[in-house]
């Protein structure tokens, strides 16, 4: 499988909004989406935000906390490297291993340029993904 990795530049700390927009965009295209986050706190927060972030929007999703079945959900939020809903799009709110990324045709990553340490970490991931053969591209 050829994995396509697209980096989206974040000039401000607005990742949650971007995660929701991307999940909605792919969902409306009929795709299943997996969104990774760092920990349970981020998972619960994003889960709540997805219900309220846009007044007229309905984005069916579930937070995979181990207590719910996520097989049928079009959008799943998770802290683990597993794909319970058979997603074809991985939106990395938290970076994943190259091996896990290779399971998806389409991967979205973030180039966080608003802080020097985050910018450098984003550069290092870009290089890692290029060396893994993903041919990442940057969208500003």
Image: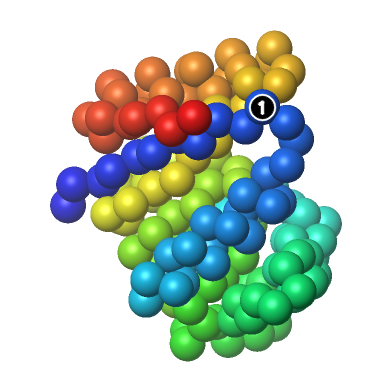
Is residue 66 at least partly visible in the picture?
no
Residue 106 image offset from top left, x and y in percent: 33, 52
- In this rendering, the count of numbered labels is 1
Q: Quadrant of residue 135?
A: top left
Residue ID at (39%, 38%): 6
- In this rendering, the answer to whether 125 lies above or below 20 is above
- In this rendering, the answer to whether 110 lies above or below 68 is above
Residue that badge 1 annotates: 11
Residue ID at (48%, 18%): 124
Residue 46 image offset from top left, x and y in percent: 74, 61
Is residue 110 at least partly visible in the picture?
yes
Residue ID at (47%, 25%): 125
- Residue closest to the eye, 115 or 65: 115
Position of 2 with respect to 114 (left or right) is left
- Residue closest to the eye, 16 or 118: 16
- In this rendering, the answer to whether 52 lies above or below 17 is below
Residue 119 image offset from top left, x and y in percent: 61, 18
Furthest residue in direction front, as rendered: 56
- In this rendering, the answer to whether 51 lies above or below 122 is below
Position of 73 with respect to 17 (left or right) is left
Residue 130 image offset from top left, x and y in percent: 30, 24
Position of 69 with respect to 99 (left or right) is right
């Amino acid at each position: 499988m050829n994995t396509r990795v697209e980096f989206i530049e974040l000039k401000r700390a607005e990742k949650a909004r971007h995660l929701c927009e991307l999940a909605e965009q792919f969902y409306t295209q009929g795709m299943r989406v997996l969104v990774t986050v760092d920990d349970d706190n981020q998972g619960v927060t994003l889960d709540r935000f997805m219900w309220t972030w846009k007044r007229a929007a309905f984005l069916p999703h579930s937070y995979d906390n181990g207590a719910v079945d996520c097989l049928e959900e079009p959008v799943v939020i998770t802290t683990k490297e597993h794909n319970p809903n058979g997603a074809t799009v991985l939106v990395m709110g938290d970076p994943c291993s190259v091996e896990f990324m290779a399971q998806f045709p389409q991967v979205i990553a973030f180039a966080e340029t608003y802080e020097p340490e985050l910018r450098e970490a984003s550069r290092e991931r870009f290089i890692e993904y290029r060396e893994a053969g993903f041919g990442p591209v940057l969208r500003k």
